[in-house]
Amino acid sequence: MKITAIGVGGAGCRVVDALWRDDQSRDSSYLTATRALDTDTGSLDRLESVPKSVRVPFGGLETKGTGTDGDRVSGTAAVNEDTTALRRTIDDAITSAVEVVVVVASLGGGTGSGATPHLIRRLADAYDLPVYAVSILPAESENAAIETNAIDGLRSLREVATGQLLFDNEAWKPSGQSMAESRDRLNATVAERLGALFAAGEPNSPDTVPESVVDASEVINTLAGGQFSTIGHGSQQVREVESGLRSWVKSLFDSSAGREDVDTVESIKAVDTTVRRAALGKLTLECDLETVSRGLLIIAGPPNWLNRQAIADSRGWLSRETNAIQLRGGDVPRPDATHVSVTVLLSGVASDRISELTPDCDYSPWWTPPHIIGVVARLRPLIACGGSAPIVFPLGDCLSNLLCRDWHR
Ligand SMILES: Nc1nc2c(ncn2[C@@H]2O[C@H](COP(=O)(O)OP(=O)(O)OP(=O)(O)O)[C@@H](O)[C@H]2O)c(=O)[nH]1
Ligand SMILES: [Mg+2]
């Protein structure tokens, strides 16, 4: 799928920088354009990969080019100060090829939390495209102001973003390491998972045709399962790594390169264990698998390792494991791959971490089991009394609860 990726604030820009490297490392590109937007000019200068031309400072009067120091209100003032310039740079980044816009920010930061919801609101108003936030949550050991930023950021983004893909620093930051020490690894992890998702539908090799293509609509429909989504990833090496020269020479003389005979039992095992590793391993946001409302399972690897029956069985397993109402799937044959790699997108998830941060909000979509149980519970008095008189009240109640998406509490 073709995306425009916009980073906001220090962490957001660094993740987009890592996404840029991920995109460059792939055979075909999913990134149509990038923008790195920050109130801190020094932080923009220190990015490693995105071209200087896409690094855009904003809010210079408000922040003097040194960031907001965690002040969310200042982040909002900064974005309002430069609306026209930001609008212009984003307009240039959203061409007709773009299918989805992704805005990455850490919700703990003043710039990320304060500016991102305003940017997304404007994007959503201006373009008929899904606009997803990639929201980075702070580690619990950070200060209270950072946590408050995250809480306010989550609430604001809920109103404006088409959905949020979460990454939880708390779960991923190795204990005993500072954020400065660990952030490159964390950002590479986010980029790897997002990249695997966005690159899945991009053509790899003219000789290999997927059984089931993952196009943008598969991702968009899966993300429509609810406000919060999480990504799992797993891989298993199934072939020796060959030097670039050796594999090039081999591909010149051997038209069946990448299509070696593969033991069926081995290939079934590889798919099966890698799918389990992706779904049961560490997700970008830990969640209760039973709360997933929609899922997407992407299995990539050397063509002969993508055993059809194993893929179908794994999909069945994931469907049972999650109770997902819809579970999509696709395969990505890669003749040069040395690994079977699995990416799972799970959406509409409920998570303890989100409940801790925003205990009074229920983000799950209205058709999920807790809501349906809530409706039945509320209708029970009506059914029990069997009368028509009280009908207005329970129905009115249900309708108002449906509108505020909070009816099982
Ligand atoms: N995953 C990840 N988290 C980061 C990174 N840098 C900072 N953080 C976390 O993100 C929060 C701070 O966000 P930043 O992006 O640095 O802040 P900002 O949006 O630039 O806002 P201000 O600097 O306050 O104006 C804290 O919770 C940090 O621990 C990073 O590169 N990756
Ligand atoms: Mg900053």
Image (spheres, rainbow, N blue to C red):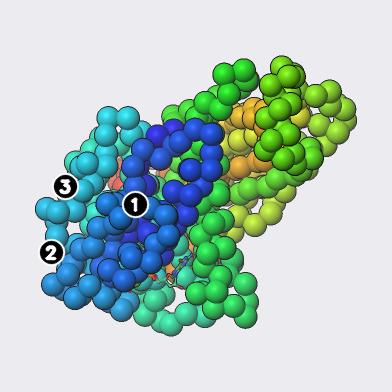
Q: Earlier in the sequence, mark 2 or mark 3?
A: 2
Q: CA distance from mark 1 to mark 3?
A: 18 Å
The location of residue 42, given as percent across then percent down, is: 31, 71
Q: Amino acid at mark 2?
A: Glu
Q: Name the residue located 52 percent from the left edge and 26 percent from the top edge.
A: 203
Front of the two marks 1 and 2: 1
Q: Ligand 1 within 8 A of label 3's CB?
A: no
Whether tag 1 and tag 2 are in contact, CB under 8 A, the answer is no
The residue under the point 52% across, 64% down is: 184
Q: Nearer the viewer, residue 45 or 408?
A: 45
Instruction: Give left or right: position of 308 versus 33.
Output: right
Q: Give the vertical position of 275 relative to 86 (above or below).
A: above
Q: Which tag, 1 or 3, sits closer to the chain's start? A: 1
Residue 50 in sight:
yes
Quarter-of-image position of residue 259? top right
Q: Nearer the viewer, residue 338 or 403?
A: 338
Judged by depth in the image, the label closer to the viewer, 1 or 3, is 1
Residue indicated by mark 3: 88
Mark earlier in primary sequence (1, 2)? 1
SS under mark 2: helix
Point out which mark residue 51 bears: 1
Q: In front here: 169 or 195? A: 195
**Residue 244 horizontal/vertical position (percent):** 67, 38
Q: Is residue 364 visible?
A: no
Dot 3: element: helix
Q: Amino acid at mark 1?
A: Pro
Q: Which residue sits at x=16%, y=73%?
A: 62
What separation in Å lies between label 2 and label 3 (alpha carbons)?
14 Å
The residue carrying mark 2 is: 81
Contact? badges 2 and 3 (CB < 8 Å): no
